[in-house]
Amino acid sequence: MIDTPGFDDDNRTDIQILEDIAKWMAMKGYLTGKHQLDGLVLLHPVTMHRVGGNERRRTKLLQNLLGPNACKRVIIATTMWERLRSENDAKIGLEGREKDVWYDLVSQGAKVRKHYNNAESARTIIREIISLSQKHGKLEPLIQTELALDPQLVSSTAGRSMRKDLKADIERSKALLADHLKERPKEPRKRDKVMQNKRYKDFKSWEEDKKEIEKRLARQEASLSKLSSFHVSRQP
């Protein structure tokens, strides 16, 4: 049993998650065929009703890591049912996800199951994973196949998709910064600083927003550079 980093962790970037998975697979010998997986369980709390941008992006990352051929060995296990007053509270949200953010996973064979936070429920899911593995064979994620052929992370399907998204984010940030610079207010005079008046406050607010945009742009450019240079060793 392997517990991976949470895909809903806002303190970890998509690139950190992707790199950690690639490093782990290389270290444990998955890129040389030493080990294989039986299946994958994606945990989803039913208390999460809205589909946000992070969930869409991370689900896309998961799909690019797995590839369509691996989806038959995937179980989406819904959790936290014990926190609901009625199971009907989660029904609409789950049906919506199956038609939206989970559509590709489910249409390619992933199963949605309930996990009731007890040992028997967990065993039922694991038994199904074993059964799926016996029926369809071992799970070989697309990222495993791709990294075994090319150690450059950016050459993988997940890496290319992430690079495309990062470049789009960088262009948006650059455009936002250019527009922001055009709206530069008058610089405060000494007396404005002393009086802390509207002119001073407007300029300070503009300056703080500028710094935030520049920081975001710098992070995005650093992430793209890191992604482009990262590679894994095929040997464990």
Image (tube, rainbow, N blue to C red):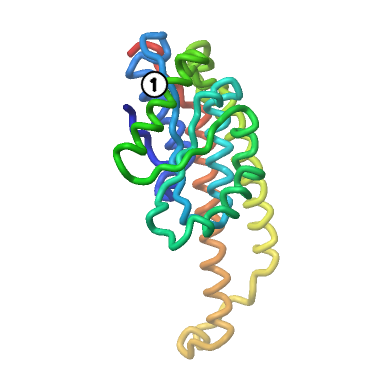
Who's the residue at 54% across and 20% down the image? 142
Q: Position of residue 224 (x, y in %)?
A: 54, 36
- Which residue is at 58% across, 83% downward? 199
Instruction: Tell me the crowding category of disc 1: few under 14, some 14 to 19, or many 20 or more residues within 10 angstroms, Cα based.
Output: many
What is the quadrant of residue 70 in the picture?
Answer: top right
Residues 166 and 71: in front is 71
| Image position, residue 134 (x, y; %) | 45, 14
Work out which residue is located at the far left of the displayed protein and give it: 119
Tell whether 145 sits left or right of 5: right
Determine the image quadrant of residue 99.
top right
Locate residue 80 relative to residue 145 in the image: left or right. left
Along the line of sight, which residue is nearer the eye, 201 or 5?
5
Number of numbered discs present?
A: 1
In this image, 161 relative to 112: left or right? right
Is 141 drawn above or below residue 92 in the view shown? above
Q: Quadrant of the N terminus?
A: top left
User: In the drawing, does residue 50 fall left or right of residue 235?
Assistant: right
Q: Amino acid at mark 1?
A: Met
Residue that numbered label 1 is attached to: 25
**Residue in the image at 57% along x and 86% along y:** 198
Q: Residue at x 44, y 20 (%)?
A: 131
Q: Position of residue 202 (x, y in %)?
A: 58, 78
